[in-house]
Image: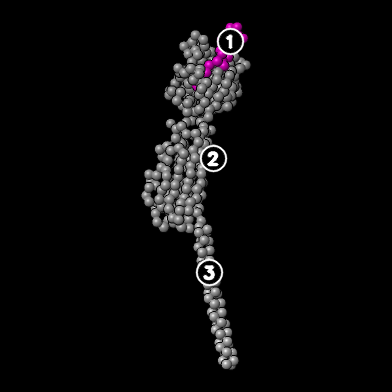
């Protein structure tokens, strides 16, 4: 009996050991399965984190500085992605003036054909396009003071890159004028001490000997004649032949300046600060001299418009006309005070 019990116990032990081995294998299987699942999930998560937005580079081609109304600013915009590109979006805080838009595209067929009429907003890429370079031109509209341009590139996975550019609206150097105040000219008739000739480039005043040595610089002069009285005259004006000393008769370079009396007020004159304003104020044509500027004269108190040989336009405000010290020629030996506003450069018409 005891012999059979011992055999039975032995078989039970063997069964227990086999079951234990099976359970360990099952546990190992589930452990490996859990590890594999975790690795898969981690791998998926890493893939999402590695998604990268498009590359977006924006370069301002136009020189830095303020841009006047009506002028343009150009940008080169390069967008690329590891995936296909989806859209390019250009948004401005102020709608650009006529002419604003995309002026060049590479590759030429990058977009769905809207670039020719593009003025702003999102524009769609064609399929299989992963990179593009465009030239975008923005023209500053009237009334704008500062413009913000936001450029956004989106790929097919809706990954986004964004850049911002700012345009400051202002007066360019070319639109600034020169102002020469309280310029004193001596009458070429008899004044031998105060220069009679004036240059609008630099506001130079020269007597005959100085001016004759730099003839191309001077634009007009002053004399007080017996008939014409207080007169401003172009270097090429024939009235200079009446004078023996302070004259331009023998000059080889005679700049042609033309004068016109205007109806502008002193307030108008004082308010002009830009080349564009002078362009509007100065009429075409004119004569080689403007006379009767003295008190009681036909042009007394008037603002005088003029155009120089090289096409720059300006205005003259007449100040005091003072007698000189020559008892026989009080007016002819006197002076005139003028304030001049003149364009720095010619405005294209």
* Residue to which mark 3 is pinned: 34
* Residue to which mark 1 is pinned: 323
* Residue to which mark 2 is pinned: 64
Magenta-highlighted residues: 315-337
Element marked by disc 2: loop
- Dot placed on the residue nearer the N-terminal end, 2 or 1: 2
Q: Nearer the viewer, mark 2 or mark 1?
A: 2
Q: Nearer the viewer, residue 215 or 58?
A: 58
Query: For the point 56% across and 12% down, which residue is it?
Result: 321
Expressed as whole percent of the image width and height from the top left, the position of residue 304 reads: 49, 19
Q: Looking at the image, do the residues carrying marks 3 and 2 touch, with CB atoms under 8 Å apart?
A: no
The extreme top residue here reads: 327
Query: For the point 48% across and 15% down, which residue is it?
Result: 302
Element marked by disc 1: loop
* Whether residue 244 is visible: no
What distance separates the C-alpha of mark 2 from that of mark 1? 52 Å
Query: For the point 53% across and 27% down, which residue is it?
Result: 177
What distance separates the C-alpha of mark 3 from that of mark 2? 61 Å
């Amino acid at each position: 009996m005891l012999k059979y019990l011992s055999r039975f116990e032995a078989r039970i032990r063997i069964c227990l050991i086999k079951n234990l081995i099976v359970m360990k294998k099952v546990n190992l299987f589930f452990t490996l399965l859990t590890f594999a699942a975790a690795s898969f999930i981690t791998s998926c998560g890493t893939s999402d984190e590695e998604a990268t937005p498009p590359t977006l580079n924006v370069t301002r081609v136009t020189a830095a500085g303020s841009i006047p109304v009506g002028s343009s600013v150009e940008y080169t915009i390069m967008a690329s992605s590891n995936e296909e590109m989806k859209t390019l979006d250009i948004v401005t805080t102020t709608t650009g003036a006529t002419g604003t838009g995309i002026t060049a595209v590479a590759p030429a067929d990058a977009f769905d054909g809207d670039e020719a009429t593009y003025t702003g907003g999102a524009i769609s890429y064609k399929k299989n396009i992963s990179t593009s370079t465009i030239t975008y031109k923005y023209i500053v509209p009237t009334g704008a003071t500062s413009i913000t341009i936001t450029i956004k590139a989106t790929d097919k996975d809706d990954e986004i890159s964004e850049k911002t550019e700012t345009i400051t609206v202002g007066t360019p150097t070319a639109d600034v004028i020169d102002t020469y105040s309280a310029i004193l000219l001596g009458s070429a008739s008899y004044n031998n001490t105060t220069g009679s000739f004036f240059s609008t480039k630099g506001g130079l005043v020269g007597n005959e000997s100085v001016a004759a040595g730099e003839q191309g610089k001077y634009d007009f002069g002053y004399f007080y004649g017996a008939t014409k009285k207080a007169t401003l005259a172009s270097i090429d004006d024939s009235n200079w032949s009446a004078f023996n000393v302070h004259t331009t008769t023998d000059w080889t370079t005679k700049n042609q300046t033309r004068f016109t009396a205007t109806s502008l007020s002193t307030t108008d004159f004082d308010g002009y600060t830009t080349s564009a304003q002078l362009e509007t104020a100065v009429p075409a044509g004119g004569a080689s001299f403007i006379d009767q500027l003295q008190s009681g004269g036909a042009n007394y108190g008037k603002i005088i418009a003029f155009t120089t040989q090289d096409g720059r336009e300006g205005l003259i405000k007449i100040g005091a006309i003072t007698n000189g010290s020559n008892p026989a020629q009080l007016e002819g030996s006197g002076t005139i005070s003028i304030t001049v506003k003149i364009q720095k450069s010619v405005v294209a018409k």
